[in-house]
Image (cartoon, rainbow, N blue to C red):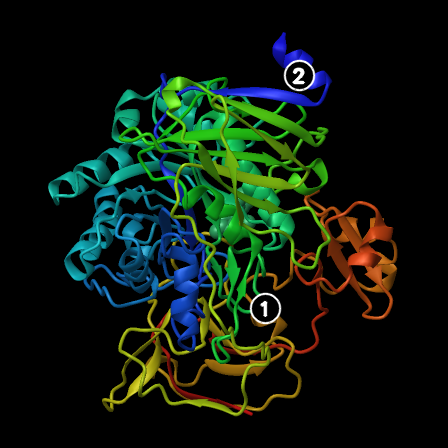
Amino acid sequence: IVGFIAASVGWAQLSVDRSLLGNTFDGIGGLSGGGATSVLLPNYAEPSRSQILDYLFKPNFGASLQILKVEIGGDSQSTDGTESSHMHDSSTVNLHTGYEWWLMKEAKKRNPNIKLYGLAWAFPSWVGNSSGDPFKFPELTARYLVEWVAGAKSEYGLDVDYLGIWNEKASDSNFVQVLRKTLNQRGHEGTKLVVKDGGLDICNTLLNDKKYADAVDIIGLHYPTDFQDFSACQRLEKPIWASEESSSYDDLNGAACWGRVINSHWVINKITSSIMWNLVGAYYHGTNWYGSSMMTSVEPWSGHYEVNPVIWATAHVTQFTEIGWNYLLNGTGSGELPNGGYYATWVDPKSTDFTMNIVKISRDHAMCTRPPLPNFQVKEETVTIQLAASMKAPAELQVWYSNFETFDRAPPMLQKSTVKVTDNRFSLFVPIGSMFTVTTVTSGHKGSFDQIPSTSPSFPLDYADDFQSTPESQNARWFADQIGAFEIHPSSDGKKSLKQMVPELPIGWSDQGTRGPMTLIGMREWQDIEVKVDFKLPVAHSTGNAVSASTCPSDAFPVDLTDKQCNGLTKSDASTPTACREACCPLTDFCNVWEWDESSQSCWLGYVRDPSMCKVAKGFKSQFRHLERSHAACVAVRVDQMWENGVVLCVYAD
Ligand code: 147
């Protein structure tokens, strides 16, 4: 009755009592890969590279991530490119390919408590003995994954805390049991298995297969909706995670989506961890899902980078909690606000520390890329929080505030203040768009660096590389492999060269058709570029149509190179906001406003529904993203149709 009366007058009292603890909190994470989303980061100019890593991983600075999930490279296209495998063939384990090892080390260096989670999108063909099925020979695939876990430990001293199966593809009861056994035999009992990085259906499968369920530690769901029946998953009595989440733009909208779900997932479905796809936008403009990351770093040559609002939405939780704290259950510290929005409380079981989040996002701003959201209303309100004696509340609490629904040039992002606690009670005015943290923890900090180099978006020409200074087994600087894996290895004359390392079509993740290996460098906005490439072919192919370096090779791209499917529209397709929207987003309704812009002859995406508001806000990069139309393209170096070790000796472009 009290709740009802309070709601009707726009005033609510919420009680927080830690005498009964809820589930254990498992952390908030970011995902590098799925795929090649970090490719431009390792060769980024310093000090920017270290600063970007600080924004992501350093405790009490930025996103201060608690989990780093990475792709286990599988030699195949997995969204923004290919990540190199540690075993291109069954007889060679190479723990120096790719950049995820480096990234995990950098994360651990900054936060020794960060948890590591590996997942494969694709597999080299040999794990299926050329059958294309990674579960047909379970010992081979288990050996492949366990070599990665063992290599992390032996080569880098890294413990892999969590291991997944096959991103958004099938899982398999027998395989997961074999994998568990193989991990244990090799001394990796501590590595927990997450199944199956996909849809809810896994929960019924596990309920009907005890041996399978016994081999699984964590239920990993992708983009879980808060509005579906979770009872089957809850009956398993295992932690449930949103093991991939968001895929939303890196603007205020993306932060609003993320701030909402990292609270609502607990309140509604007792999800205890969420992991954002993706960690850092270090992939070329023109590859898929540009600008859908915690932060953006696409200029390795200039060192320019962007710290996006998603960083601060993440900090609202990560800087004020630790893995192993307990959530408080609905009604005793968590729940829905009477006038829309969510609140959640975490408590440290070993001390009297506690942290609350309160988040109120309107329907227009709450949408993530997926899944669909039902309609709802929110209204601003004042809430009074009644702290039970069990909370042992101090006289003053720290308050941190952000707002993701404002047209201010500098929206409040993790702004600090305090609130007095009187008679075990405090009140807070909660406006629309807000995210609050109220906490006993005093170590929170909004990190910043003095000077970020100014933007210089053009790829620097003249460019030349003979690869002699690149470490062996690594990718060449600024190259972004799209199909196949190109690494630096000695050629027959002993000099280093860029070599395509994948001998056979992999067990892929997304369709790569019959196109052969291809790597990419430069800008799709280029026109009239001259490229010279020296190359050498394996003897068997020396007469074939083998290596080409092409400009504007629209057919060379393995995937549709579009920004959210919205390029290449002509005015007749898209001359009204509705036509823009429909043409740009035929499948989902995640984009709220698309508008045709006469002067730039292109569609614009905004986040308000009223098109007249778009005009006011146009030009605010943080809120509107310009979707350029493609002119020319980048340079693609490809080895046509050939799953053999073609060699590129050097590349010049001017
Ligand atoms: C996910 C992938 O796992 C990521 O690698 C990345 O491609 C991401 C981009 O949004 O998408 O794959 C999904 C594909 C389809 C759906 C969900 C995730 N879906 O249709 O719900």
| Residue nearest the observer in this picture, 430 or 24 | 430
- Point out residue 584 in the picture as x, y percentages from the top left corner: 73, 53
Label 1: few (<14), some (14–19) or many (≥20) C-alpha neighbours in 10 Å? many
- Point out residue 258 in the picture as x, y percentages from the top left corner: 55, 43
| Residue nearest the observer in this picture, 378 or 467 | 378
Q: Is residue 16 left or right of 289 when viewed as pictured?
A: left
Q: Is residue 510 left or right of 175 when viewed as pictured?
A: right
Which of the numbered marks, if any, corresponds to residue 285? 1
Q: Residue furthest top?
A: 1
Label 2: few (<14), some (14–19) or many (≥20) C-alpha neighbours in 10 Å? some
| Residue nearest the observer in this picture, 594 or 410 | 410
Which of the numbered marks, if any, corresponds to residue 6? 2
Judging from the image, what secondary structure is the residue with disc 1 in? Answer: loop
Query: What's under tag 2, amino acid-wise?
Result: Ala
**Residue found at x 41% / y 70%:** 49
Quadrant of the drawing holding the C terminus: bottom right
Quadrant of the drawing holding the N terminus: top right
Q: Quadrant of residue 103?
A: bottom left
